[in-house]
Amino acid sequence: MVDFDVETRKVRTEEFATVGALTVEVYVGEGHVDAESPYVAELFDTATRSASAEVLVAVRDGEVLGSLTIARYGTDYADIARPGELEFRMLAVAKRARGAGVGTALVSRVIDIARAEGLSAVVLTTMPSMPDARRIYERLGFAGVPERNWRTATGLPLTVMRLAV
């Protein structure tokens, strides 16, 4: 069921800690990232992310239920974006809000931004341990791009997906 009361917008300064905690809760708490990884600090540091990328939130009744980070080609947070592509990373949806369309609303907003900016595609990297997120991406039309798959410094395999817009 899609929750039509969810608003997607840019994160506000007073929400930085909430977004950081939610992102860490999802990535570390659900076993996607090891608690000792240096990446945990990056996941939590919404202030730094929002200074060089665009952090979006999904909010209902004043409560942050999800977030993601948009990384434009050539910027600090872009891992895989090529010219003409808009990348997003760090999608996190609170467990209690899953299945209500929060993740879909955030990803749809990224797609809308890419179209409005005249870009050719939206790209993302996902992990094998994230089947819920992958279902959202596939439902929205993203497809795997195996030749662009890569591994983290610790050897974790990552899957690249792309949607032509």
Image (cartoon, rainbow, N blue to C red):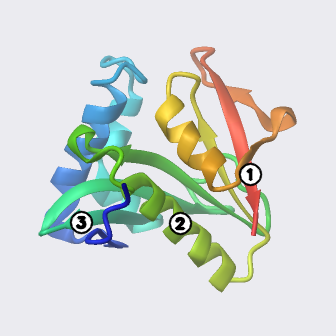
Q: Which residue is mark 3?
A: 59
Tell me which corner region of the image, top left, top right, bottom left or bottom right, holds residue 105: bottom left
- Say which element carries label 3: strand
Query: Which residue does the image show at 33% across and 23% down from the upper left?
Result: 30
Q: Which residue is mark 2?
A: 108
What is the tally of numbered marks visible in this picture? 3
Quadrant where the N terminus is found in the figure: bottom left
First in sequence: mark 2 or mark 1?
Answer: 2
Image coordinates of residue 126 in percent, x first then y, are 59, 36
For residue 136, above or below residue 157 = below
Distance between the alpha carbons at the discs numbered 3 and 1: 26 Å
The residue type indicated by label 2 comes to Ser
Q: Which mark is residue 61?
A: none
Image coordinates of residue 35 in percent, x first then y, are 30, 19
Left or right: 76, with 22 as reference point: right
Q: Which mark is residue 162?
A: 1
The residue type indicated by label 1 comes to Arg
Distance between the alpha carbons at the discs numbered 2 and 3: 15 Å
Tell me which corner region of the image, top left, top right, bottom left or bottom right, holds residue 161: top right
Image coordinates of residue 151 in percent, x first then y, are 67, 24
- Between 1 and 77, the one lying in front of the other is 1
